[in-house]
Every structure is written in C-alpha cells, then in structure tokens.
Amino acid sequence: MDYLKIEKEERYSIVTIEKDTADDMLFEQLFSMVVEEMEEGRLNFIFNFENITDFNHSLYLKLNHINNIILKEGGILVIACFTAVNPDLFNDLDIVSTKTISEGGDYIIMEEIERQFMEVDDDDLEDDMED
C-alpha cells in the first residue's frame, strides 16, 4: 500500500491515493485497507482521488463493492476531488462525491447527525407505542 496514505480524523479516515492510474491493484488495496480499518472500528471514509487522472470505467463495480461493504456496516464512503470522470456517474452507484475533502467531511458529519435524529425518533415512536 505504498501509494495509499491514511489520515485518521475523529469521525472518518481520509485515504489519499498517491498515484495517477486507478487499476485493479488499487481497488484490491483499498478493499484490504477498508477491511483493516473497519476491524479497528472505523466506519467512515473519504477517498481522495485528486491525483487520479486515468480511471477505467469498469472499476466502478469494484468501487461499488467497497461502498456496499461500508454501508452494510453502517458506515459512509465519500469520493472527493475526483476530476478524471464526471462525478455524477457515482449517483448511479449511490456513492457520494464532493469537490473537496472538507465538503466530504461535512457530509459525513451531517449524515451522522441525521442518523442520530432518526434513531431518537424511532425510540420515541417505540415508547409511544408501549404506552
């Protein structure tokens, strides 16, 4: 994982890819890194793709697989700074993309807050049903 740099923030990990080509090996390493981080209890990730200039569209499926694993565990994946392709293509995969890492961090924080409110609302609903 020579070209994956991980910065651990309080609520998420920023993974910067320090190579210009997205290939199968990159996604295998991203997958392994995500699994390792999740075993340590980290669930939210921002993949910084600012250095990627060459992206094979067939790799969307591998990226979607990583996203599905993160979602299944209750985490969030955001792709940031990706200019190699139109970021709207991620909408078909339900992957959030942002123009900056800062926007990605804000998205994760807001999503966590929204989930907390939804949990509180669900708890209140259950309490009302018990009464």
Image: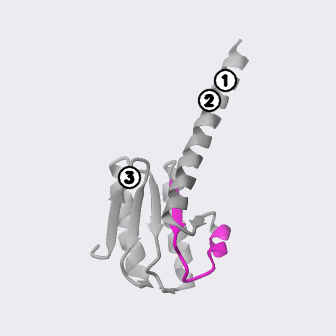
* Residue visible at 52% across and 48% down in the picture: 74
Type of amino acid at the residue the image marks with label 1 = Asp
Residue occupied by mark 2: 120
CA–CA distance between discs 1 and 3? Answer: 32 Å
How far, Cα to Cα, is label 2 from label 1? 6 Å
Which amino acid type corresponds to the residue marked 2 in the rendered image? Val
User: Of tags 1 and 3, which is closer to the observer?
Assistant: 3
Which element is circle 2 on?
helix
Q: Which residue is mark 1?
A: 124
Q: Quick one: 58 or 42, which is closer to the camera?
A: 42
Which type of secondary structure does the marked residue at label 1 adopt?
helix
Magenta range: 76-92
Q: What residue sits 38% from the left and 52% below the top?
A: 9
Residue most extreme to the top: 131
Task: Give, as a three-letter code, the residue at label 3.
Answer: Glu
Residue 91 visible: yes
